Image: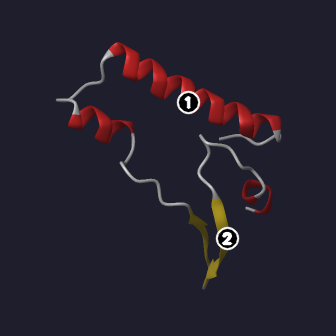
Amino acid sequence: AKVLATIAHPHVVTVHGSGRHGQQPFLVLEVIPGGDASKLAQAGGGSLDELRARTVIADACDGLAALHARRLLH
């Protein structure tokens, strides 16, 4: 969680904190308005057009690359 909190990237959710509630660990994450790719598809009638799908995938890959550069795996 400490390493994740140091990553500032437009395609990686910001970690604001972490802790434990009893035995259960938790992360405090940035709230992203608009939902996930599934919600985008639902809003578009059940699917994404090719350009939008490519954009979502490219953004996700950029975020994963930022994590991998810090030697983290998703």
Quadrant of the image containing the N terminus: bottom right
All told, the count of numbered labels is 2
Which residue: 64% across, 79% down?
Answer: 20
- Disc assigned to residue 59: 1
The alpha-carbon separation of the residues under discs 2 and 1 comes to: 24 Å
Mark 2: secondary structure = strand
In which quadrant of the rendered view does residue 60 lie? top right
- Disc assigned to residue 29: none
Question: Of the residues under marks 2 and 1, which one precedes in the sequence?
Answer: 2
Q: Which residue is mark 2?
A: 17
Which residue: 78% across, 63% down?
Answer: 2
Judging depth in this view, the residue of 22 and 2 nearest the camera is: 2
| In the depicted structure, whether residue 42 falls above or below residue 29 | above
Of all residues, the one furthest to the left in this rendering is 45
Image position, residue 28 (x, y; %): 58, 68
Quadrant of the image containing the C terminus: top right
Of all residues, the one furthest to the bottom in this rendering is 22
Mark 1: secondary structure = helix
For marks 2 and 1, give the one nearer the viewer.
1
